[in-house]
Amino acid sequence: MKIILNIQRFNPDTDTGPYFQEYGVEADPNERLLDALMRIKRFQDGSLGFRKSCAHGVCGSDAMRINGRDGLACKTLVKDVVEKEGETITVEPLRYLPVQRDLIVDQKPFFTKYRFIKPYLINDEEVEGKERLQSPEERMVFDDTTNCILCAACYSACPVLGEKRGFVGPAAIAQAFRFIADSRDRGRDERLQLLDNKTGVWPCQNHFKCTEACPRSILITKRINQTKELIKKHQR
Ligand code: SF4
Ligand code: FES
């Protein structure tokens, strides 16, 4: 069927600001939005800029806003966002990150906040035996958070970031929880301290938009609330 993609364009070398451009494209309802974007780029307009790599929901590079909701173009089927022939899909870059070109954003602010929470195992104790052991039950406490692909869909979906740009954001807190809750880690107090302030966990108002946007079904809001509870228990 024929659909219309209404895509936000911006070339910093030639444009004074972003604008929308429409492309008519043939698409199968069971195709992914990424397929339609690729067809436009190959056969209609090679200047269209967007990121993609794996095309299978693993690398996190093609997160964008699709009809006002954040997600991966490679995990969004055409039939999920249009109902019938001739309908329009609006495609925009992720919010709160500087646009470099068209749908490509500069992810540096997102990764700076991610690094801030020390997203790695902290433990300088001697290892007994060959490795630090963990039971399946201990692992399940934070298992979903290990699936993060750092796509930043949750970051763009978060209404709080629209008002408080300094907020560390949902992905960073979920990743902080990933290590705080890890029985092998010893950096809990340090990370809880980093998040116990007005740019840490407290601006979160439980909108659940991050959880809805996450293509990896991570229970982000729940993990944020658990982190708040740990701060109350251990720091105050
Ligand atoms: S928590 Fe989910 S939405 Fe957020 S960066 Fe990770 S995978 Fe993407
Ligand atoms: S292209 Fe890798 S997640 Fe979509």
Image (spheres, rainbow, N blue to C red):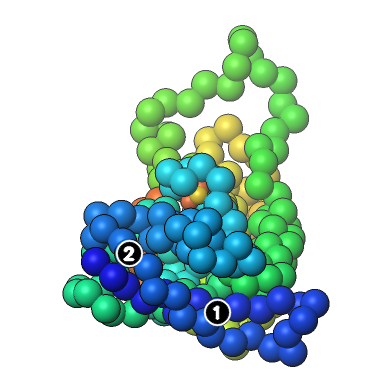
- Say which amino acid is labelled 1: Gln
Please determine whether, in this image, residue 167 is positioned above or below residue 79: below
Q: Is residue 209 left or right of residue 130?
A: left
Against 164, is 133 above or below? above
Quadrant of the image occupied by residue 11:
bottom right
Q: Residue at x 41, y 55 (%)?
A: 35
> Relative to residue 106, is residue 77 drawn left or right?
left
**Residue 40: x %, y % from top left:** 48, 63
Q: Residue furthest left?
A: 84
| Along the viewing direction, whichever of 117 and 211 lies nearer the viewer | 211
Q: Quadrant of the N terminus?
A: bottom left
Asked if residue 177 shows in the view, the reply is: no
Query: Viewer-proximal residue, 33 or 159?
Result: 33
Q: Which residue is mark 1?
A: 8
Instruction: Give me the residue at 80% from left, 77% from top.
Output: 13
Q: What amino acid type should be assigned to the residue bearing mark 2?
A: Glu
How packed is label 2: few (under 14 Cα within 10 Å), some, or many (20 or more)?
some
Can residue 29 be seen in this snapshot?
Answer: yes
